[in-house]
Amino acid sequence: MASPELAPAAEQPAPARRRGNPSALFVLFGIIAAIVAAIVVGLSAAQALVLLGIPDPGALTTYGLPAVRAMSEIAAVLTIGSLFFAAFLVPPQADGVLDVGGYRAVRTAGVAAIVWAVTAAMLVPLILSDTSGQPLAEAIKPENLWQGVGQIETALAWAWTTVLAAITAMLIRLAVRWSWTPYLLLLSLVTLMPVALTGHSASGGSHDMATNSLVLHLVAASVWTGGLFMLFAHAWRGGAYTDLAARRFSVVAGIAFAVMALSGVINAAVRVPFEDLTTTTYGRLVIAKAVALIALGVFGWMQRRRALPALEADPTNRLALVRFTAVEAIILAATVGLAVGLGRTPPPAPDAPPTLLEVELGYNLDAAPTFANLFFGPWRLDLIFGTAALVLAAAYALGLWTLRRRGDSWPVGRSIAWVAGCFVLLVTTSAGVGMYSPAMFSVHMGAHMAMSMLIPVLLALGGAMTLALRAFRPAGRGAPPGMREWILEFLHSPPSRFFTHPIVSSVMFVGGFYALYLGGIFTAFADSHSAHVLMNLHFLLSGYLFYWVVIGVDPSPRDLQPVTKLAMVFGSLPFHAFFGVTLMSMGSVMAESYYRGLGLPWNSDLFSDQKVGGGIAWSAGEIPLVLVMLALLVQWSRSDKRTARRVDRAAERDHDADLAAHNAMFAELARRDREHR
């Protein structure tokens, strides 16, 4: 199937006269954030660090670190927001090349990514100086620098950020077409993760909840802050489609505000007790940040009530939008500085020291894993995957409601499959299964088999992309592309064609188990919460990609024959079986020091527990195999029926000319045979 062109851009009024270059305003935002961060550290955090026994590294590090960190955060949100703006807020040209507004946003992202990389590199010696208590001149020496990066987790995280931001900056320089921007946006969000998974939230009790909430908080804050900066710059320049960009951003800002508020409350509740909010420096800073968020929400509401109606009435009347976004952008820049200062301030000490399990897992496990404990016991919502399950189910229900309101029908079986997949994902990550998974290899393997072999099958049978294509209306000729056009562009993009190749998807589906468990990755990172998050993500995505290709309910970039799909399924089964047998026959225990250190009395026989995990891996493919075979048989039968109906309709149109020609051919052959006799 040929890749569809993006809908051409609609006619817009001529852009207003350019008021000036907003680059100076971006610098101003960075300066505001840096000043606020330095002031917060000077008033609260610096003395607190000294009281904790950390030597004073000097004023250059004490005040330079938060200032550079704040500028790095502004550069990060500018990179992410600019790419988001170019990808989803303003349309490209009819041939897919970036329009003026999108091109400017991408160029802004390129410069911001360079600043992001440079400031991240500057933070590495500053963090080493701050952690060691040595002056910056000592920390920046090559021998101290290279040795310290491998020993201090935060410094290593910023080193990774430097590399990823530099790669992002180089790739941005090559982007001239719209199709690049969603993938560059994804890469920029990945660049946030090394730092998001370290710091206060990654240690102490409930660190799993705190880390997951921080990831959601940073992603929402980056899209909101960066998108607002770019909306302001676009309106300041008098760019085309300002009204469309403002309407789209208003929806995104509302979602981001809700995510930031909920994740911020959860993160604060984990780090500081309610009674310490007004009596500790950390608590007061949390209150100040909450007040800033409320103020931003008020400005957003006023913008929706005043600026957007004014733009809708007259797309050239950008004055109200510029005013609201300017004030909101300044408050956001100050909030970024406040957040940096908060991150430099030690949270109050807990009333009781955390237990060993709270340090390692984030929570306690008080009983052995029984069937009731695994599925019906106390739940602990996984803020990433559990929330994703709830959101996916709600979005699917919204799509069904849209079809029903139009009077369209939708197969009940697909709805049941999708809801079942979301439910299994919720149980696997948020019920007792998710809690015991990091502590016992057998439960861990059962959870990962479900994420790789069962949940993706159910989700693929749900046909969510087909539902979305039916629920979203086409943009129409001459209108800017919307959700339906974005989905179609994704389906027919070169990355989609590459990852849906039968060999590529099969290798990703099967090879992950061998690389993680037999390649030593799991043993090296068994104690890392972020590693478990990435493992879950890998198994879900690789499994869904594989079954998307195999089951084929949704449209795919590649039209595979049923025989090829069967070959993919039966070709992968021996590798899964061999992997399970290998685990059961291993003579050593993977991650033995980690599991032994947990000291769980009901999991003392680690070798037997690993054998159970291997047995689960060996037998886990049976249920998905049955589901896939049934789905393929149904599809094969329906394909034959469609072919038969098509042949019957053709026969009715031409009075069965094909059959008559077929019979005539055999009659001619019979006549020649008689003549030769």
Image: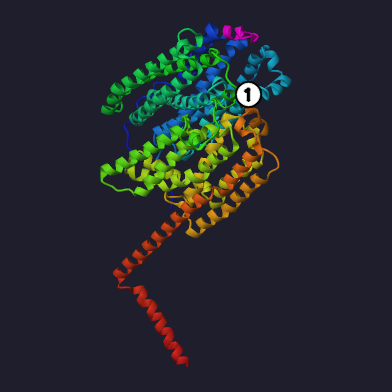
Q: Is residue 471 left or right of residue 377?
A: left
Q: Which sits in the foreground, 441 or 116? A: 441
Specify whether residue 95 is in view: no
Report if residue 509 lies within the magenta region: no
Q: Which sits in the foreground, 478 or 664? A: 664
Instruction: Characterize the local packing of mark 1: few (<14), some (14-19) or many (20 or more) Cα atoms within 10 angstroms.
Output: some
Instruction: Give coordinates of residue 653: x percent, y percent.
Output: 29, 68
Query: Can you identify the residue that label 1 sits on?
Result: 153
Instruction: Give coordinates of residue 469: x percent, y percent.
Output: 36, 45
Give, as a three-letter code, the residue at label 1: Glu
Q: Which sits in the foreground, 16 or 262? A: 262
Q: In this view, does 604 lie to the left or right of 187?
A: right
Report if residue 51 lies within the magenta region: yes
Toward the bottom, the furthest residue is 677
Q: Which residue is at a point 31% across and 22% down the rendered structure image?
A: 307
Q: In this view, does 385 lie to the left or right of 597?
A: left
- Quadrant housing residue 196: top right
Q: In this view, does 296 lie to the left or right of 357?
A: left
Specify whether residue 315 is in view: yes
Toward the right, the furthest residue is 143
Magenta segment: 46-59
Instruction: Give coordinates of residue 297: x percent, y percent.
Output: 36, 19
Q: Which sits in the foreground, 134 or 211? A: 211
